[in-house]
Amino acid sequence: MSEKEQISGQKAAAPVPGKLKKTIVMVGMMGAGKTAVGRALAARLGAPFLDSDHEIEAAANMTIPEIFARDGEPFFRQKERQVIARLLEEERGVLSTGGGAFLAEENRQVITAKGVSVWLNADLEVLWNRVRHRDTRPLLRTADPRATLSNLYHERVPLYAKADVSVVSDGQASIETMVDRVLEALKVRPDVLEWN
């Protein structure tokens, strides 16, 4: 039996998540895996996948770097708050948010009231390895992006730590393993998921 068959055989014995009662909101730093893990989690749950950054881009008909360049970060954060509140109101699913979304007290309150926040907790080295070759991160368009990321990381971690659930993203686990970790962490939250 292959390793893959063994793993899928083991999964068959594990409890299967059932009905989603609240939106699961993925929070954390850029590069933590919020979109990839969130998309796979939504597929596993048979729930809609929502992405606040994508929704903002679609509404503005601009990319996030273009919005930052034209209108600035405060304007972007205002739109982000509006989009997150709307998405949490409209339907249950898995919502991936931008790295700065959970920093705003207003966003944390609405996420806690309407959903559950899941912090993908990745260390600085994992994050840097994932984002250093991409130029799509407006906050890292600086003379020293590594130092900028480090500063953002140290400023933001205490706020991410306020999330309802924390799941370690070590840079080694597959996306499917990360989904397993999130589901395992959510077992203590019967208000979020029913289990079959």
Image (cartoon, rainbow, N blue to C red):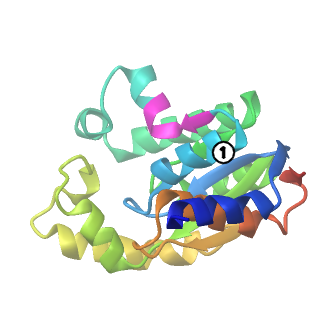
Taking 25 as reference, is 92 left or right?
right
Residues packed near mark 1 inside 10 Å, few (<14), some (14 to 19) or many (20 plus): some
**In front of the other: 43 or 158:** 43
**In front of the other: 180 or 25:** 180
Q: Position of residue 115 (x, y in %)?
A: 76, 49
Taking 110 as reference, is 168 left or right?
left
Q: Residue 142, can we see it?
A: yes
Q: Position of residue 27 (x, y in %)?
A: 55, 58
Q: Residue furthest front?
A: 1
The amino acid at mark 1 is Arg
Q: Residue at x 49, y 71 (%)?
A: 169
Q: Position of residue 45 (x, y in %)?
A: 71, 43
Asked if residue 89 is positioned above or below residue 155 in the image, the reply reads above
Residue under label 1, please give it. Answer: 44
Q: Residue at x 75, y 36 (%)?
A: 92
Describe the element under mark 1 as helix, strand or loop.
Answer: helix
Q: Residue at x 65, y 32 (%)?
A: 48
Range covered by the magenta-colored residues: 49-55
Residue 50 in the magenta stretch? The answer is yes
The quarter of the rendered structure image containing the N terminus is: bottom right
Taking 134 as reference, is 62 left or right?
right
Q: Residue 118, can we see it?
A: no
Taking 18 as reference, is 87 left or right?
left
